[in-house]
């Protein structure tokens, strides 16, 4: 196969300070060299913050055109040097699905979002209609659905559809599976594999859910720590994905939790009584009932768009049911402060000028914060702006900020999305430490698609849809299987 992408002596540094006099410049990576052939399907791996997104953004031109950095070396696409070319010029050959799909969405309606990129490449109306029908069928999205009402996983599917509609033969996907349910992830990977094998698309996919991706890819590029103290990472190349092994290293054993309520009788903290909730003409919940008792740990499972995040928003009081009631001692304004809510998008809860300010803002114990700083490896980030961190680092920071307040009730919406194995282990250890501080009497409700983490996040399961990947949990003795619609 011919070479479609070549990187020659590529170097990247965000250390652009003019005051650097008595120290050497710090590089994310230095003098990378590799070639990618037509039809290659490559998985890009590495710990959170190692530079995976930066490498993809150098290929598509976001760095340095839209993000300040020092860059050396050259990039060739189809044999043409594109180092000095704009993002617009590179998009003729390179399609990108970014880590945060919300940043790419500009239209109110799904169909308009998918069609717009096709209009930019002057597709005929007939061809656009054909592509739109095919892409909607692929994603399961509705043409007239409002983009603002889509779940995180549905937004990722939408932006993937927009990219595929432009027919670029080089695809860069940054954590596209992070918020997708297992079935959607499998369908996307099968599609990418078919495009790679049958239509010679070149695919580079950055992903932490390696166990899902490995069966489909041909090669693995691993970001590993550099031996040079002034360079953060380098790449290791495996031309045969079968030679690559992944796995969690040291997850804590899940402790058996005997809460104070176990012997004294169940004490409800949320009673959901025959609620209805609709979005437009669509019922997300219809005559839905559920009870959460103090000290219980629940995991909510289900396909993208089935209402998982909406259910947490209903419990918290961000939205109200169309009919029925939710009874809770936390309904009153003064008691809402006792609920910690870790949102699916960490950008929505980070607003202080420095990482250290976020961590100490509502913390009850400075000693607990210091322990979290060491556990998550924040020591060298305390003076940085939170939004300058990688997506994985922001997710860990958002989680740490909420649990530093030691809430009585904890809501977690996809807490491990986009985290590498080490980050997931850190998060689970932090949860264990938090529980030990209150004799395992904290109530936790988690949404997750991450099969690595689900067994550790709870011991009771609310299954909102009968999607095949969740059947193992449907049969769990502590599972509550509810068709929400």
Image (cartoon, rainbow, N blue to C red):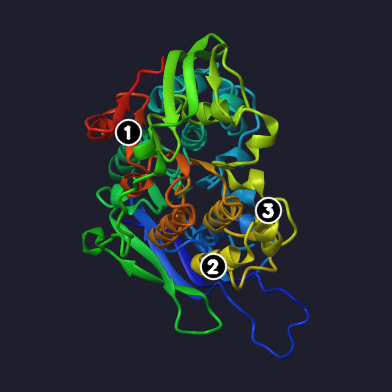
Q: Residues within 10 Å of mark 1 (few under 14, many from 20)?
A: some
- Foreground disc of the pair 1, 2: 2
- Element under disc 2: helix
Circle 3 sits in a helix, a strand or a loop, which is it? loop
x, y percent for residue 256? 30, 50
Task: Name the residue tied to disc 3.
Answer: 362
- Kindly report the distance in space between the C-alpha atoms of the residues bearing marks 3 and 2: 15 Å
**Residue 310: x percent and y percent?**
53, 26
Q: Which residue in the structure is indicated by mark 1?
A: 183
Q: Residues within 10 Å of mark 2 (few under 14, many from 20)?
A: some
Which residue is nearer to you in this view: 158 or 396? 396
Mark 3 vs mark 1: in front? 3
| Nearest to N terminus: mark 3 or mark 2 | 3
Between discs 3 and 1, the one toward the N terminus:
1
Tell me which residue sits at (37%, 25%) in the image: 464
Whole-number angstrom distance, CA of label 1 to CA of label 2: 38 Å
Question: Residue 112 occupies which quadrant of the picture?
Answer: top right
Q: Residue at x 44, y 30 (%)?
A: 292
Q: Position of residue 356 (x, y in %)?
A: 68, 64
Count of picture labels: 3
Most foreground residue, 483 or 113: 483
The residue under label 2 is 371
Q: Please state the horizontal and vertical placement of residue 7, each as a whole percent of the image.
A: 48, 67
Q: Is residue 115 visible?
A: no
Per the model, the C-alpha gap separating discs 3 and 1 is 39 Å
């Amino acid at each position: 196969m011919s070479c479609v992408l070549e990187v020659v002596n590529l170097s990247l540094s965000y250390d652009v300070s003019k005051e650097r006099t008595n120290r050497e410049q710090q590089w994310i990576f230095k003098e990378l060299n590799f070639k990618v052939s037509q039809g290659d399907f490559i998985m890009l791996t590495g710990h959170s913050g190692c530079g995976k997104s930066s490498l993809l953004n150098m290929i598509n031109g976001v760095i340095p055109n839209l993000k300040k950095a020092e860059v050396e070396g050259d990039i060739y696409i189809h044999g043409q040097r594109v180092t000095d070319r704009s993002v617009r010029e590179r998009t003729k050959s390179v399609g990108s699905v970014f880590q945060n799909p919300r940043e790419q969405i500009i239209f109110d309606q799904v169909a308009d979002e998918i069609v717009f990129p096709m209009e930019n490449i002057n597709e005929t109306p007939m061809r656009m209609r054909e592509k739109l029908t095919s892409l909607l069928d692929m994603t399961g999205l509705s043409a007239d659905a409002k983009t603002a009402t889509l779940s995180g996983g549905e937004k990722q599917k939408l932006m993937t559809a927009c990219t595929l509609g432009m027919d670029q033969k080089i695809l860069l996907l940054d954590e596209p599976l992070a918020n997708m349910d297992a079935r959607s992830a499998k369908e996307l990977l099968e599609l990418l594999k078919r495009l790679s094998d049958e239509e010679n698309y070149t695919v580079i996919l950055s992903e932490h859910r390696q166990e899902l991706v490995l069966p489909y890819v041909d090669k693995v590029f691993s970001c590993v720590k550099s031996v040079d103290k002034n360079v953060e990472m380098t790449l290791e190349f495996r031309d045969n994905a079968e030679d690559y092994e992944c796995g969690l290293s040291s997850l804590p054993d899940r402790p058996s939790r005997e809460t104070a309520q176990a012997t004294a009788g169940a004490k409800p903290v949320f009673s959901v009584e025959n609620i209805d909730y609709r979005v437009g003409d669509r019922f997300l919940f219809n005559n839905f009932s559920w009870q959460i008792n103090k000290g219980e740990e629940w995991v909510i499972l289900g396909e993208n768009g089935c209402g998982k995040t909406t259910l947490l928003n209903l419990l918290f009081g961000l939205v109200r049911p169309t009919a029925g009631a939710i009874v809770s001692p936390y309904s009153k304004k003064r008691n809402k402060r006792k609920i910690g809510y870790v949102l699916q998008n960490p950008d929505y809860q980070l607003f202080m000028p420095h990482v250290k300010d976020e961590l100490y803002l509502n913390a009850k114990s400075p000693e607990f914060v210091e322990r979290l700083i060491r556990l998550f490896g924040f020591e060298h980030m305390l003076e940085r702006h939170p939004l300058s961190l990688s997506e994985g680092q922001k997710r860990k920071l958002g989680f740490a900020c909420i649990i530093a307040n030691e809430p009585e009730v904890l809501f977690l919406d996809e807490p491990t999305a986009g985290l590498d194995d080490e980050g997931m282990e850190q998060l689970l250890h932090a949860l264990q430490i938090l529980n030990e501080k209150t004799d395992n009497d904290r109530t936790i409700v988690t949404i997750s698609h991450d099969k690595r983490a689900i067994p550790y996040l709870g011991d009771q399961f609310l299954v909102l849809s009968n999607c095949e990947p969740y059947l193992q949990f449907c049969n769990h003795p502590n599972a509550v299987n509810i068709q929400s619609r």
